[in-house]
Amino acid sequence: MSLKKIVLAKPRGFCAGVDRAIEIVEQALTLYGAPVYVRREIVHNPHVVAELREKGAVFVDELDEVPESATTIFSAHGVSPAVHDQAQQRQLRVIDATCPLVTKVHVEAKRFATEDYTLLLIGHEGHDEVIGTMGEAPHAIKLVQTVEEAQAIQVDDPEKVAVITQTTLSVDDTRAIIEALKARFPKIVAPAKDDICYATQNRQNAVKAICDQAEVILVIGAKNSSNSVRLTEVAKDAGREGYLVNDTSEINPDWFKNITVAGVTSGASAPEHLVQEVVDYLKKLGATEVQEVELVREEVSFGLPTELREALNA
């Protein structure tokens, strides 16, 4: 092995929305006791889910698995109005852990739909966030996943088209799709502020920064974590090998043959202890130097939802 150096990207790991979602589950368990039910994965990371399960959280796919009147938390990815209605029918005590940046996209979707726009949602089919957003106005929203789809999509009124995006996309890929849509629909309306969240953008930029040194990039995150998958794509677009791993058990030491510098980052739902375990693993392969490259300092935080804050105060 020729590995000598590890370059750590910063920012990496938990974003404000993930921090908030995890705290919501922990506070609900303290307040109401176990079990507290969580619809879908609170964030897309099996280690986080396992740790919360050990504390008493019960993860379900749908609300019909939850006993009536039980305390139920919606994940950080957001849910459709139909899910809120179902929770009300089952008289569940709901705590909504939807990331405020995802809520912003839902608000935009409702506003544009009310104004009779055709909404083009850039995102990945089947992702929890996309399902929730499309549920706000299913009659008005069409999903666009690629430049090719942007060039072919049909709308009723080309004069009344708006675009919104999933929050965890590739900044570069999304820009290309939006440019293609602008070429098709010159009067297309976009939100005043970019829908792609600050943490997603920062983590992608941080990977680009370490690609100047690192020959291989390890991204710690789950396969179903959209923002983590995007980080590996950013590395590959920069001409580097990018590997997505849940933890050290998925690392292949052969990736580092004839490699001098390895880069390490983590998706927005991956705990920092996994990063440190990967650093220790790479040290055993020969790395003796660790350098952290900090691109920007994140100081964003989100408050707890009103329903939980009021209960804690009471």
Image (tube, rainbow, N blue to C red):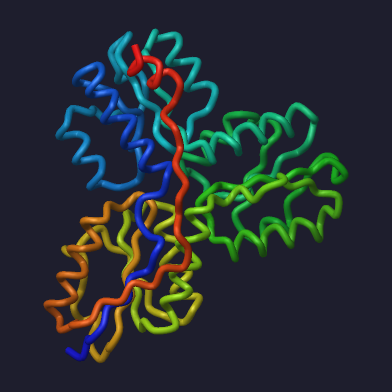
- What residue do we see at 52% from left, 59% from top? 201
Say which residue appears at 35% left-offset and 49% top-offset: 269
Q: Quadrant of residue 58?
A: top left
Left or right of 134 on screen, residue 87: left
Residue 311: x %, y % from top left: 35, 15
Residue at the image position 50 percent from the left and 67 percent from the top: 205
Task: Report the quarter where the C terminus lies.
Answer: top left
The correct choice, above or below, for 200 with respect to 279 in the image is above
Indicate the position of residue 92 as horizontal and vertical percent values: 37, 12
Q: Position of residue 304 (x, y in %)?
A: 41, 29
**Which of the pair 28/310 is nearer the observer?**
310
Task: Indicate the position of residue 252 as horizontal and vertical percent values.
Answer: 20, 74
Please state the total of marks drawn on the protein image: 0
Depicted 303 relative to depicted 152: above or below: above
**Quadrant the N terminus occupies:** bottom left
**Residue 57 lies in quadrant:** top left
Residue drawn at the location 25% of the way across and 91% of the way down: 258
In this view, the residue in front, 264 or 47, is 264
Foreground residue, 34 or 199? Answer: 199
- Tell which residue pokes out farthest to the left in this image: 284
Left or right: 102 in relation to 23: right
